[in-house]
Amino acid sequence: MDVEELKKLDHKKKIRIGLLMGILCALYWGIWYAPGYAVWNMDILTGLTGYWLDPEQTIWIPGAFEIHNPDISGDLINIYSCIFLTGLNAIFCALVLFIWNGGLRKLPEFKRELVQVKGASKYFMMAGLCGACAVSGTYLASFNLSPGFAAIAGLLYPIIGTIMSVLYLKQKVSKRGYLAVVVLLVGGITLYSGSIITGGVEGSGNATIGIIGGIMAAVGWGFEGVCAGKALDFCEPDIGLHLRFCFEAIFWIIVMVVIACTGTPIFDTIGELLDPATLFVFILLGLSFAWCYVTWYKSFPLLGVARGQAVGSLYAACAVIFLCIFFGPASALGYDDSNMLIIVGTTILGLIICLVGSFLLASEDTEGMVSLREQKGGDER
Amino acid sequence: MMEGQPIKFRILELFNEKDWWLQDIVPQLQEEYSLKGDYGRGMITYDIVELVSAGFLTEGETVIDEEGKFWQGHLLHHYTITGLGKEMYQTIVDRIS
């Protein structure tokens, strides 16, 4: 085999590994919604939010928030619960990644990048804050509308990711890439239309907060990809995302301590983590989300931010499938008898259109694309 | 200046000084960062691949390592820093100094 053939093979191998990383990211990300939704029915959260004792919904057991303040609104309870859950999610991801990076012998690099605030860690701090917005938005959408809606709403993040990767990171995006963004936008409008028309399922929460949560997820993840892409240019991906989760965890710990200082009993059920079943679910949350990020961040240098995000977008289909398997279609997509047709129709149609958009981005011809960024004229030494 | 700093900072510094062949730069970095063995070699090679993907380095001449002096049967590239890589290196220097 000559050098040229080997070079072509090498390039194809890089793209193949990038695609593999993107697909693994989609699987891990998709399965994350299952423990993320299940945890709402565990004592650690029902102890805070309250719950119906019987299936007929006649006996209400108030949670710690309501006991502390009987006038507290349901929306505020939702928001506090999402903060609590997002914070624990970030803490468990950070812990999982300590083990991961320890095993990979990368902890010395963690220290080197952490202390380089201006040169490295500030970008991961920004990515962590954008991620905090995205994950809390996902939980808000998941609780107030449905986990299926939350998963598909997040699909819109490549729109922000693609626009910013062109404007800010100066990466190449073809006409096909722009067409994909338009298709994704149409898919997003289709998805949102069902929930806006029907207002979600009565009694499951505030549909408006759910819709805002969906937008937070898309915008947060889009900007996170951009901040991360900027920092990944000169940092180790495994360390970068570890720093990102550490900063997100610190952010949420500060937020939760501030909430606790106002007298709100946000830590009342934290002892439930000692329960093996609860701990197991949180470890699953940490493992699936941390590994989804490991593979997501690894796909960026090999595929570029725009295409890395697009392949990862298959997570929405994985999430809908996993949620339907574990919780049944009604809970997964958030419908009842009165609005089944509209919700199922717009959700599935939105999903299909978004996947077409993602496919358009992901299936571009990559021949000749050795570098993902436009080279400036005469820059060769 | 970049010794003991994050590894990609150091890689950019070394390339800013001169062009390198893969088989020459990797052992030096393995020594500096205590990343011995095949695993360390693979990790540093991947870092360089990422810098190429980011557009900071460009591949030049390529030969096949037939003698197995670095990685038998694999490609050995000669890398050069690009204008963008120089800019990024300067940005990093300005930020950390």
Image (spheres, rainbow, N blue to C red):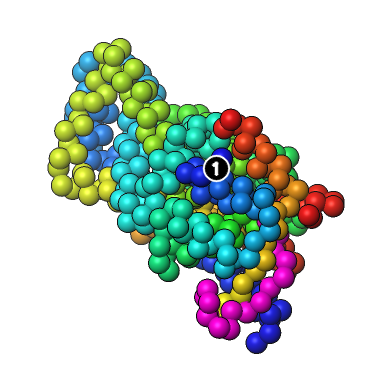
| Residue drawn 36% across the image and 38% down it | A90
Query: Type of residue at label 1?
Result: Met
| Residue drawn 38% across the image and 46% down it | A108
Between A285 and A73, the one nearer to me in the picture:
A285
Stretch in magenta: B54-72
Q: Is residue B76 above or below residue A315?
A: below
Tell me the quarter of the image containing the C terminus of chain A.
bottom right
Q: Is residue A106 above or below residue A262?
A: below
Report the chain holding disc 1. B
| Residue drawn 61% across the image and 42% down it | A230
Magenta residue check for B62: yes
Percent across and percent down for residue A380 are 79, 55
Tell me the quarter of the image containing the N terminus of chain A.
bottom right
Q: Quadrant of residue A257?
A: top left
Q: Is residue A296 left or right of residue A167?
A: left
Magenta residue check for B69: yes
Viewer can see residue B2: yes
